[in-house]
Image: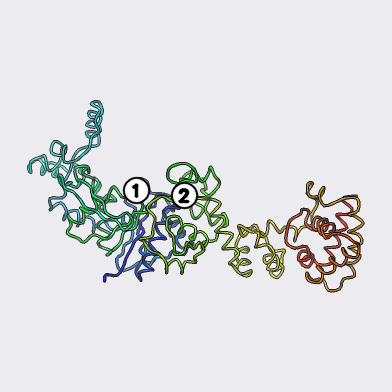
Amino acid sequence: MEKVRVRFAPSPTGPLHLGGVRTALYDYLFAKNQGGEFVLRIEDTDTARYVEGAEEYIEEALEWCGIIPDESPKKGGKYAPYRQSERREIYDRYTEQILKTDYAYMAFDTPEELDAIRAEYETKGDVFSYDNKTRNRLRNSLALSEEEVQKLLDEKTPYVVRFKMPVDRILNLEDIIRGKSSVNTNTLDDKVLVKNDGMPTYHFANVIDDHEMKITHVIRGEEWLPSLGLHTLLYEAMQWEAPQFAHLSLILKPEGKGKLSKRDGDKFGFPVFPLDFKDPETGNISKGYRENGYLPDAFINMIALLGWSPADDKEILPLKEMIKEFDLHKVHKAGARFSKEKAEWFNHQYIQLKSDKELLDILKSTDLDLSHISDDKLIRIIHLMKERATFPKDIYENGKFFFEAPTSYDEKASKKAWNEDTATILSELSVVLEKTETFNAETLKQVVHDFADNKGLGMGKVMMPLRLALVGELKGPDVPDIMELLGKEETIVRIDNAINNFK
């Protein structure tokens, strides 16, 4: 059997969208599941929309996600170059080849001429299409004589190369995800294959590159489904074997209809790009998942399940397990609705799976200033706080009371935890704690329990105001754990501060 080869072929026209990451991930998972190869190709023929830095962004984003290409512009490979802008000689050769067939022709119509024809059609309530019904009446090599065509070429008149769509043919198409379908060629127009600057359009360039790079499966978004008929015919025209196709459904916005967009992210407060992206022209920064505190393995796990269900409906799948289980035939036809809450849930789950040491390294890689805290103390704080964290920074933010004594006390919590007896209770407890030699959580738990018993108090009467004194709020891990980490001296200072505050 032929070795499976897939490609992810984004255009460097801006940051990589969530949907693009999912396409790359499915390409990668399928290739690795089949023991095949994953190729990154940059389709940069649209020079008008090219954005500086976009290609580097794409490569960095895939690397952060762990979607590592076997071949790419950066890595190279036996089918290089992997940028379309560097493959002009290849395209020129195939342009000559297709013009010798009955599947393509030269069209000399100017944009102004075509605009005038469109306007004329519109006045009659019709829509103009450059197709088998109109092409023989327009300025192209099908309608003009050989002499007229040669004269235009001699005069270096600009022209495009169009595909000559066959008349009244039924194309039987097949898609791995969507199954079989058919289309009549009379419903398809004569698409431009080569622009008047000699560069191919997406339609021609991607077919040429997929053939040259021996791509066996094309996995792409459903927006390319209407082009499947044309691409199938292009393979026929060039007498090449076509790859198998799989068209992925859309990622839908959280509410309402339609595709997830940056506008939805801005509205609902979540990124739609993997990394921050700074627009080179405006300087505006579009937020990314990495900078928002998402772990890459949580991010790709979340993305993977937007359109695919593994066996037993498992939700937590490390990349190796995803590769093992991935099956294109189990990718959903229907669109998958994005959920900010689900994305956060995945991140929380992956934080729990990380070791304390791994989370220490992640925290130290953020922009937090942790230079005043020892690694040992940070590890202990991480161990206590990670269970409540959605993002790594939450460990620090929610555990600030470990580094800073409270200067104020939550009003609602104070009313609940503090009454006229509380100062006396905590003063007496402070004396007991001062005499406690082994200041660890296990011992302290017993000390506080015995103190409450001896005083005939419920544990809430002691623990709630004690927590308020140490934290400033009624939150955080177990109080004995907090006391152990703060140490005896700081614990007693905080109890005294609270008593003085409430006086």
- Which numbered circle lies on residue 337? 2
Please provide percent x and percent y for residue 39: 35, 63
Q: Helix or strand or loop: what does disc 2 sit on? A: strand
Q: Viewer-proximal residue, 257 or 87?
A: 257
- Which numbered circle lies on residue 223? 1
Which residue is drawn at the image coordinates 60% and 58% (left, top)? Answer: 391
Of the 4 image quadrants, the one containing the N terminus is bottom left
Return the residue found at the far top.
123
Specify whether 234 is left or right of 84: left
**Residue depth check, mark 2 versus mark 1: number of the one nearer the observer:** 2
Please provide percent x and percent y for residue 265: 51, 46
Q: Where, by quadrant of the figure, is residue 456 drawn? A: bottom right
Instruction: Tell me: residue 357, above or below residue 54.
Output: below
Instruction: Tell me: residue 477, above or below residue 16.
Output: below
Please provide percent x and percent y for residue 91: 23, 56
Q: CA distance from mark 2 to mark 1?
A: 17 Å
Please provide percent x and percent y for residue 295: 55, 61
Specify whether 98 is left or right of 228: left
Kind of residue at badge 2:
Arg
Which residue is drawn at the image coordinates 83% and 63% (left, top)? Answer: 491
Q: Viewer-proximal residue, 122 or 151?
A: 122
Who comes first in sequence, dot 2 or dot 1?
Answer: 1
* Label 1 neighbour load within 10 Å: few <14, some 14-19, many 20+: few
Which residue is drawn at the image coordinates 85% and 51% (left, top)? Answer: 418
- Which numbered circle lies on residue 329? none
Q: Helix or strand or loop: what does disc 1 sit on? A: helix
